[in-house]
Amino acid sequence: MKKVFVIDWILIVVFIVSAISGIGLHIAGHGNSHEVWHNWAVVHVVSSVLFLVAIIFHVTTHWGWYKGIIKNGIGRKSKVTAVLSIIFLLLSVTGIVLLGVSGANSPLGLWHYKIGIITTVIAVGHIIKRLSVLKKSLN
């Protein structure tokens, strides 16, 4: 299997764990158990760091696509992918900032959660659009 597909499959796995743990973390924030919230937070931070690392590799393998946008504009290239890239950057920045502050029940934490939901919806569409190619990579 080509390296790009290995990265893509890893991305899908860590994306699922990061998204589910982010939602679990948000729900746990409404509960009374700090231990439950903490456990969700640990899973979310670890999976999200792995996701960020995988995204860096993913962007690196598709760097030509990004260079084409910078050089020639968006043109016929996927506008959804460009929007996903920008929203993910915003999600990452808010997530990294939250590591340095008390993010539980904070306005920034809520923004991060809302941006995460938007990112998840767009990312699922991004994955579904490419699923047939990804399935073929398993052969």
Image (tube, helix red, strand yellow):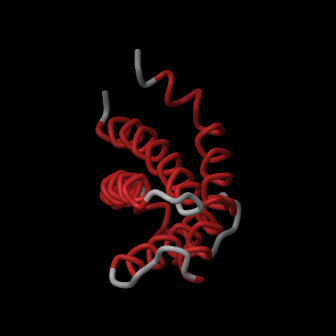
116 versus 126 height, above or below:
below
Residue extending farthest front = 32
Q: Image point 56% across, 72% down: which residue?
A: 112
The answer to whether residue 3 is above or below residue 1 is: below
Name the residue: 31% across, 33% down. 2
Q: How many marks?
A: 0
Name the residue nearer the viewer: 59 or 55. Answer: 55
Q: Choose top left, top right, bottom left or bottom right for residue 128.
A: top right
Name the quarter where the C terminus is drawn.
Answer: top left
x then y, percent, for residue 85: 54, 66
- Quadrant for the N terminus, please: top left
Residue 111, placed above or below residue 9: below
Q: Position of residue 93 (x, y in %)?
A: 44, 78
Instruction: Give me the residue at 68% from left, 52% from top.
Output: 121
Say which residue appears at 34% left-offset and 43% top-offset. 7
* Residue 80 in the image: above or below residue 4: below
| Residue 32: % across, % down | 52, 59
Query: Outermost residue toward the top?
Result: 139
Which residue is more in the foreground, 6 or 119?
Answer: 119
State the image coordinates of residue 41 (x, y, percent, origin top left): 39, 59
Say which quarter of the image contains residue 48: bottom left
Give left or right: position of 65 versus 84: left
